[in-house]
Amino acid sequence: MDRNRQVNKVVHFLLTLLIMFAVSIAPAQALLKGGTWQELNSVTGAVNGTAPLADGAIIPLYQGSTLLDPSKTHDIEFSAMPRDFSADATSTSMRAVNSTDTEGDLFSDPPTIAWENRQPPAMGLVWADAATPDTPLSPQPVPNLTFCAQNLAGRQLVAWAQVEDETNVPALWLFTRTGVPNYATIPLLSPKVALNIKPATDTPVTVSGDHVDSAFEASKVKVGESITLTISTKACDGTPEGNAPFVIRRKDAENRQGVVNNANPVRVGDTELTTTQTEYRGVTDANGNATVVVTQKEGPGVKTPLVVSSVNFPALTAETAVIFTTITSPDSDKASMYGHMIESATATLNGITYTFTRPKLAAEASGADKSVVDTNETWALFTWSGADNHCDILPDAEQLVQMRHEHSTLETWTGWPVAGDAEYWSSTKNQLSGYHAAVHMNSASVVRAADSDTLLVSCVDKAQPAAHPQITLSPQGPYKAQVGESIDLTMTVVDRDTQKPLPYRYMELFIDPAKNRKGEHQDAWDNLRVTVDSEGMSASSPEHYTGVTDVNGQAHLTLKHNSGLGVETPIRIVMPDDEGGNVELSFSVIFTVVTSPDVDGANMWGHMRGVVDAGNLYKRPLLAVEASHKDGQFSENNEEWATFNSVASATAQCGVGQVPDQSSLAHLYSEHAGGQMESEHGWPTEDYFIAADSDASGTVHVNLENGDSGKFTDTPNYLTCSANEMVAVLDVYFNDDPVIKNADAKVGEQVKMNIHSRNALNGMAIGNTDFTITMANGRRRDGLTTGFTDTSNGEMQFDDVGYVAGQVYHGITDANGDATIILTQKKGVGLLTPLNIAPVDSLISTPVSRSVKFTVATSPDTPAAKMWGHMADTITVGDWTFERPKLAGEVSNPLRTQDE
């Protein structure tokens, strides 16, 4: 058709030239007929006109043979293909726009256009979305696929012509019929043609998920749960497209604030979409449907867009998004991640349920002093005063510990922040000014924290009811020990009304001025006070201690008086109640000295005894108030001792034959030389001891401090009397083996205690000897008598009769001096129980210290354990060997601990 047009134009042009030539000949012939040629001598200049002008030339677009008017919008079937569209760049097809000539030269109709080399350049089409017409689609539509197959159905597009090789574009000329010059170069115009692609009867590829949250335009579940996607493939006419292969890939995952976070990506079916290029491949069934499960087990709380595309027609895509929320982020628009952290948690304490609110994000809180990042979220931190202002009611330590215990398992975990030591402020007062108790949520331990520290905060809906502390001590008094030894007491505090323990309660302990045995006080003793050692207690001064009870409402008090002089010290424990008053418990401790005897006439509290040497018994010296035949008295080591100036007065005091001679006293010294008679036995040694040896020249006396001896006449001497009274000693061992001095057994097992009584003077058995066994508080592995829960109060059975700390078992040996007792602990928690065994009727009492340990299966036998145990390190099942769980003390920097 174009060729015929060109031929017609050439013929038309030649006819025009012929007519013009004929018209020009006619006047010339007329002139010739009228006369001869007239030759003019003038010469004309060159013709100098203007070139034609135009806005440019339009390249027309066609759909098949149909010209597409650029001024209109054209409806296109979705089944059409881009190859159906073309651009005609032949010069005869193009049209000049607004062609003009300044001098009025004439144009052909239509104006003639021609390419520089008479050959049009190769042309292509460019496609763009009508909404962004200057931005070409990328990629451009495939020529031989329908618009529907390329996911362009229902779209409004524009298309325009473009020279394929823009680096070598020939000039385009516009011609006039008359005038010189009669042509000019004009630009190439490619107007955009609007094309309205009709929508398909149905969407070729669709995807939808369950658990849709319309607010987020995504399927949303918790991390660890699953989302089921349903994929459908259909032909453009709406009929199912069965057995159609498809792929699923993801885009970058983003957190709630739009920040990319691709950690621990989603898994589609069995395929983890590691990158945005990783693909899951599937095929729809015969009906064009498929389902696939999406999971994200350790997701950080992100939104992941998923793109489903057809394998055969990659441009056919559908998109959805999935959100897997994390428990470590709240569902707040200020959170970084998508989360489902609970806003509040409850805990029941002593029958009352309390509600705790989650800590605030830094972006949520006003008045925060600092912040900390934990598991992708930034949390508010407060000083203690800031925490107290932040909460209407700040929970006490006991409430927080209970909340932690009730939410310590995987099923009950709150997800609340546990950064660092996970310390939360409590309202519980500490013994030191400027400090309060903080609770470690990883371990449920309560620690002291300076009020200036910045910690996490959870508020509670109500405070605990007012409590009325009731203080008791175990064992019960009286409390007496030797200087250098210790008195271990367990203080227990319960509510007077409910008898429930009161943990983390502030208390004060006062060491009042001491008195001697006669009730006298000396100011010098104020600088030699009893000391108290207790976990969680501190001394503000030698006479004032402060502390708090432990998780069980107890405190282990270890009292010592290493500098004691044999005095009784009153002690007061004072604890505030919740109604503004105080509760007080008073008791006394006595630490005895070896330099005073245990008699009412002594000034000081003491435990001086006689001495057994080489089968002989030497009684201790007598106090002045004890002696009936003394000649005088002498003061030494805070006591007044009786002195004797003659053998006669000494014999009157001791009895005939009971005053030791010089050799006996010399042997006594040799066995306790170098001042041991005073340092070990406490006897006064500043004066000599009188001997029975006497003649006209004087009486012999012996110095028991240095062994010196000599004679005297009518000078004072100390006196020791020899005696033959019974001195019973006890041999105590276990399980019929004299080598075993301390017993070990499992809780519920039996231990046999063997007791044998004999005479200390000759080693012979003493039958029918009374003895006592006194239990002390049971100790856990680190020696503390607190820090554990024991509903049995450490009860031990002596021949099936229960005894607790402080209670005394009375027994007697048989005619052969033997006794056996079966010890058990049916409900033990893994304690070592000290026992004190002593003869009752012995001139010199020599108590024996033993211990019995009952171990539990719930604690391993390791120094890191709290309780004494026998848990197996491994368990074998078939071919498998399993190791026991590790204690927190066996692991460096454990993330979280659990008391059990």
Image (spheres, grey):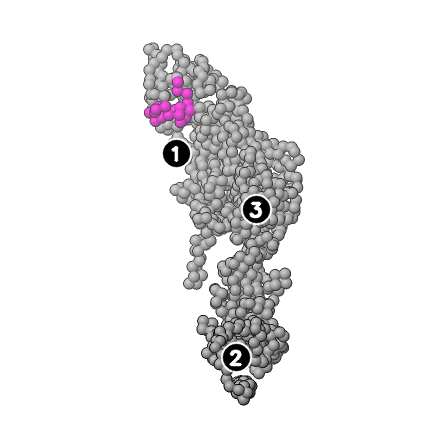
In the rendered image, the residue lying farthest to the bottom is: 33
Q: Amino acid at mark 3?
A: Ala
Q: Which residues are magenta?
A: 669-686
Identify the secondary structure beneath mark 3: strand
Q: Earlier in the sequence, mark 3 or mark 2?
A: 2
Q: Is residue 677 magenta?
A: yes
Q: Relative to residue 691, is residue 498 drawn left or right? A: right
How far apart, in angstroms, are the residues tagged by discs 1 and 3? 76 Å
Q: Position of residue 689 (x, y in %)?
A: 38, 18
Q: Residue at x 50, y 22 (%)?
A: 525
Q: Which residue is mark 2?
A: 91
Q: Who is closer to the viewer here, 498 or 225?
A: 225
Q: Who is closer to the viewer here, 353 or 67?
A: 67
Q: Which residue is mark 1?
A: 763
| Mark 3 vs 2: CB contact within 8 A | no
**Crowding at label 3, few (<14), some or many (≥20) Cα neighbours within 10 Å?**
many
